[in-house]
Amino acid sequence: MISGSGIGLAANWYIAIVALLFITHLATLPAIKLSDKSSNAGLLESFGYGLRFFTLVFFSCSILGIAGYAFNEVFLYWFPNFLFSFIIVACSFFTSLLSLKNIKRIQLTVVTAILLGITTLSIASLWAPSPKNAALPDFFLPYGTAPFSDGLFLMAPLLVGYELFATSSAKNKTSTKSYVLALGIAVFFLSIFAYAALCVSGTEKLADSTVPYMIGARKILGQTGRYIMGGIIILGSYVAFNTTLQFLKSPLITFMNSHSLTLIPNSELGRQVIATAIPVLTVSVLLLQGYAGEPITESYIAGGFALWFIYYGVNTASAINHTGSFYINMLKTSGIVSCLYLAYATLQLPEHPFKGLFIAAFVSIIIVLLSIILRRRLLP
């Protein structure tokens, strides 16, 4: 959705925006971990978990609502859309109880299926007719600043969260090359479908639509294209929620393993169930309360993403002095500045951005305080 509407707004400035986002995330890669004995590092880590928990539960609510809507509109019109959202929640819950090795196999299989679907639609677009009376952008034609700004505002959160699954296990050390490869694959496949949709739909339809992915898919392969894109949306929501649960449950399991509490089961499966149930129930309550698709949900997500960019910047700033290369420090400094601007750009999207920013910050601070209190009471 972000890629489709973003290229509709920015046309060929899409390349510049994606390059800016890609370089920003490369500049803020978690290159070094601060000492566990540092209290500031612990507070920053707790704040990062708090803002991610807040953002991800609302973001999950939104994408699960979209998946339910896609299943209802594309496959079975009579099927209640929110019921299918809960089916995805249930599938992700049971998937999250498997071993990490099996979860990774499932994730890899689903992501491969998604990439095959995107590739199929992109290749088929070569034979699709061009839109009538639509001026396709000349690749070398310079544009004004407005398309770049509008596209940047919409696409700012596009690559946020690349680090979630890798950091869901303390024993799983992911190299910088793996992060770069993952980001590069994401940029490549999102871009080829964005340009495929642009070639068959034109800029105006993509920019004005809330379902640009469906417009492009239907113009490329008709009803078959809608089926493929519907499957991509559903599988994407499933794999995204799986990753969310893996990240959110990991600190909870670590906490339960490090403290002897009588109310917590001693078995590994029991602790997995409790740690997974907390975010699952939170998202389920939000779905039942009708937050999916609500304007306030967009404000919460935007506020959370803005804080997420700020967290990237602060985390990078705390690591600058630990690197000896002048050029790396300059790159990271540029990344910090870019993160601050992207946080500003993200706040331009919803109607009440500062409300979402304030609530996200408040929840994150509460989680930090809880972390401090629990450590003081339970640690010797």
Image (cartoon, rainbow, N blue to C red):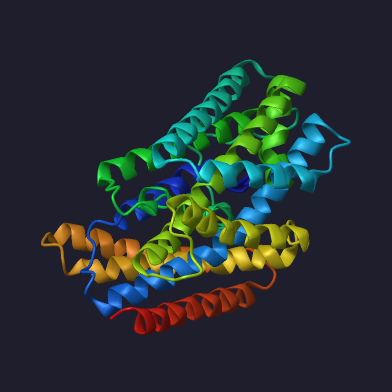
Q: Position of residue 247 (x, y in %)?
A: 45, 54
Residue 216 shows in the view:
no
Residue extending farthest to the top is 127
Residue pictured at 66% horizontal, 62% vertical: 298
Image quadrant where one finds the N terminus: top right
Reply above or below: 7 against 312: above
Taking the image as shown, residue 66 lies to the left or right of residue 30, namely right
Comparing 377 with 160, the one in front is 377
Residue pictured at 55% horizontal, 76% vertical: 363
Residue pictured at 78% horizontal, 48% vertical: 82
The quadrant holding residue 91 is top right
Residue 320 shows in the view:
yes
Residue extending farthest to the right is 78
Comparing 150 with 345, the one in front is 345
Image quadrant where one finds the C terminus: bottom left
Q: Position of residue 365 (x, y in %)?
A: 48, 80
Q: Position of residue 373 (x, y in %)?
A: 41, 84
